[in-house]
């Protein structure tokens, strides 16, 4: 770095101290380190999964949101007479054609699939970055190493996700309960499986799972891979057996060739789980009004002249300003944001981090007045403190996924806020973070407006186009 640039950065760093932001360590991108969005001081201790420190580390190495989609392959040194295939391909999740299926129309013919599989670029490991907003989060360690993402694997998972042939009577797919048109959840109180059977829990969302490890309301699956194969053999969901599902898939030539090419060991239930998990990890949602608002905060505290002087900073500022213009925060949503993160209301004691969810389990009293309440996390751990505790769900795009809570008992976002307002449902295991709030009607409306400002764009996804 030249001297002039170094001195500018020093000035900037000094200024960051002055305004109380996290200074950069001289790498020229001090602002990237301010990812305190959604992590108020009061709740710093509440989350160790997505602790702010880790988030900062991650964000520091993450490309800035301004450098948008980069699909430039990292070329290897070309040698004579060999076709060079890059070792990895940079992709920004949520953009481009990752989820839009093998190009073309209608059911997938074997020869179309074979042609797609022959393209070595579809098998290159993807080096992924997250959309702005989500990129303050941290992808759990080992997840992508254990099950590397490739275009071909994601596409295979997409087909399986939408394929009713995985169920016992060819009527139910994952999308039956986690449909893209229903915010990747479903609008019935409980999931409805084969022969119209209902379970006792509401369908949670299947997007932005790349940032999470434990799955289900009670966290009983410790990975997306483990989760994905569960519904297939669940008698009231897809009602199949793993053996039968694997046999069905192996008999469809279009699937067989894909499994044989994507995995060393062809069609088996573990690989079904891996492909579906890969697809789910690629479903991420874009920046929300609140993301722009939060990330602009530290920049707005700076002098415009200083921003104008630093190229990277200026580009980021312009990108955020343009985004904020496109997705403005209403006054009500801004007040809601302040309440949500305030010490008095403190929704962020649990709804914190990139997904506005701490990935932990809490009893907020839902369903606890029933004769035989669902004991949630307790059934997994056997620990008294976990009775009636459920995993904190994300607030991103929550406006699309009514009804709410593990039992789908609350119909609107207003009702969810009123539940907290009255201090939850009293029971011996109620979280000590839940207490009467005494919110005014306006404050209730503001919190709802804030939650609606946490909606981002959904990626384009092809829901048909399955192997013949
Ligand atoms: C009959 C409806 C139904 C079907 C079919 C179904 N699910 Fe679910 N899904 C649910 C319900 C209900 C839950 C919550 C269950 C629980 O927590 O005990 C759930 C939980 C999940 C979760 C956990 C999300 C979280 O926040 O922890 C994921 C991911 C998921 N399903 C993906 C899938 C995939 C992939 C398939 C297809 C292989 C599938 N589901 C099939 C209803 C369904
Ligand atoms: C003690 C931790 C905690 C606090 C504090 C908290 N929540 Fe929650 N929230 C949860 C848990 C856990 C659930 C799921 C509970 C269940 O289903 O039994 C939940 C569920 C929700 C849901 C339903 C989402 C869905 O997809 O079903 C919304 C909306 C919500 N909370 C908003 C808020 C708001 C607004 C506040 C502040 C007024 C708040 N939460 C405070 C832990 C918390």
Image (cartoon, grey):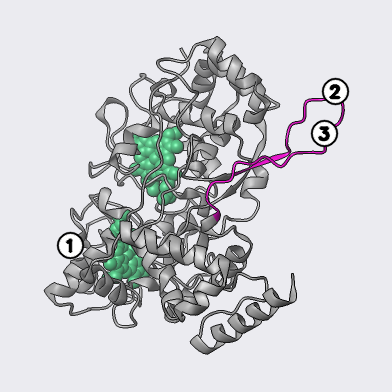
Assign ligand 1 to one image quadrant. top left
Is residue 31 shown above or below 355?
A: below
- The residue segment tinted magenta is 67-90
Residue drawn at point x = 39 percent, y = 64 percent: 321
Residue in the picture at 67% in, 76% down: 25
For label 2, the crowd category at 10 Å Cα-Cα, with few meaning under 14, some 14 to 19 and many 20 or more, is: few
Q: Nearer the viewer, residue 341 or 236?
A: 341
Side (left or right) of 307 relative to 371? right
Neighbour class for label 3 at 10 Å: few (<14), some, many (≥20)?
A: few
Q: Would residue 405 be found to the left or right of residue 410 on screen?
A: right
Which x, y percent locates residue 39? 45, 73
Residue tagged by mark 3? 78
Q: Is residue 52 visible?
A: yes
Q: Is residue 77 magenta?
A: yes
Residue extending farthest bottom:
18
Residue 452 picture quarter: bottom left
Give the alpha-carbon distance from disc 1 to disc 2, as whole Å.
66 Å
Residue 131: percent from left, percent from top: 48, 53
Which mark lies nearer to you, 1 or 2? 2
Residue where numbered disc 2 is placed:
81
Which residue is farthest right?
A: 80
Q: Nearer the viewer, mark 1 or mark 3?
A: 3
Is label 1 in a helix, a strand or a loop? helix
Label 1 or label 3, whichever comes before in sequence order = 3
Q: Give the residue pinned by disc 1.
A: 414
Instruction: List the single residue furthest toward the left.
Output: 441
User: Mark on residue 394?
Assistant: none
- Mark 1 to mark 3 CA distance (whole Å): 60 Å
Q: Are marks 3 and 2 in contact (CB under 8 Å)?
A: no
Q: In front: 11, or 294?
A: 11
Q: Quadrant of the N terminus?
A: bottom right
Residue 59 % position (x, y): 57, 64
């Amino acid at each position: 770095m030249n001297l002039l640039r170094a001195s500018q950065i020093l000035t900037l760093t000094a200024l960051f101290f002055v305004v109380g932001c996290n200074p950069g360590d001289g790498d020229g991108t001090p602002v990237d380190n301010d990812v305190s969005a959604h992590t108020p001081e009061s709740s710093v201790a509440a989350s160790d999964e997505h602790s702010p420190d880790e988030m900062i580390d991650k964000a520091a190495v993450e490309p800035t949101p301004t450098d948008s989609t980069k699909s430039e392959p990292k070329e290897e040194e070309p040698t004579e007479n060999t076709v060079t295939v890059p070792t990895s391909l940079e992709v920004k999740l949520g953009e481009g054609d990752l989820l839009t299926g093998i190009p073309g129309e209608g059911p997938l013919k074997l020869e179309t699939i074979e042609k797609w599989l022959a393209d070595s670029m579809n098998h290159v490991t993807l080096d992924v970055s997250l959309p702005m907003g989500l990129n303050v989060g941290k992808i759990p360690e080992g997840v992508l190493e254990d099950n590397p993402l490739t275009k071909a694997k994601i596409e295979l998972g997409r087909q399986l996700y939408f394929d009713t042939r995985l169920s016992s009577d060819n009527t139910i797919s994952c999308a039956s309960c986690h449909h893209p048109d229903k915010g990747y959840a479903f609008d019935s109180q409980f999931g409805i499986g084969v022969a119209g059977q209902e379970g006792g829990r509401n369908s949670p969302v299947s997007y932005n799972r790349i940032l999470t490890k434990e799955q289900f309301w009670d966290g009983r699956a410790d990975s997306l891979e483990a989760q994905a194969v569960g519904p297939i053999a669940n008698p009231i969901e897809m009602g199949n057996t793993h053996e039968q599902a694997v046999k069905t898939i192996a008999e469809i030539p279009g699937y067989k060739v894909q499994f044989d090419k994507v995995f060393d060991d062809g069609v088996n239930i573990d690989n079904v789980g891996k492909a579906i998990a890969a697809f789910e990890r690629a479903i991420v949602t874009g920046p929300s009004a609140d993301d722009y608002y939060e990330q602009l905060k530290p920049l707005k505290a700076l002098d415009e002249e200083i921003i104008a002087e630093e190229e990277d900073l200026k580009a980021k500022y312009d990108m955020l300003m343009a985004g904020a213009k496109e997705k403005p925060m209403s006054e009500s949503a801004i007040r809601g944001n302040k309440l949500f993160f305030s010490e008095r209301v403190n929704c962020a004691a649990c709804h914190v981090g990139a997904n506005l969810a701490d990935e932990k389990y809490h009893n907020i009293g839902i369903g606890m007045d029933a004769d035989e309440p669902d004991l949630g996390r307790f059934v997994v751990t056997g620990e008294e403190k976990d009775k009636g505790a459920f995993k904190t769900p994300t607030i991103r795009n929550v406006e699309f996924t009514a009804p709410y809570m593990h039992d789908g008992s609350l119909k609107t976002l207003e009702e969810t806020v009123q539940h907290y307002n009255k201090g939850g449902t009293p029971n011996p295991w109620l979280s000590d973070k839940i207490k009467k709030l005494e919110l005014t009607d306006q404050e209730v409306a503001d919190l709802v407006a804030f939650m609606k400002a946490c909606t981002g764009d959904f990626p384009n996804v092809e829901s048909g186009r399955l192997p013949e």
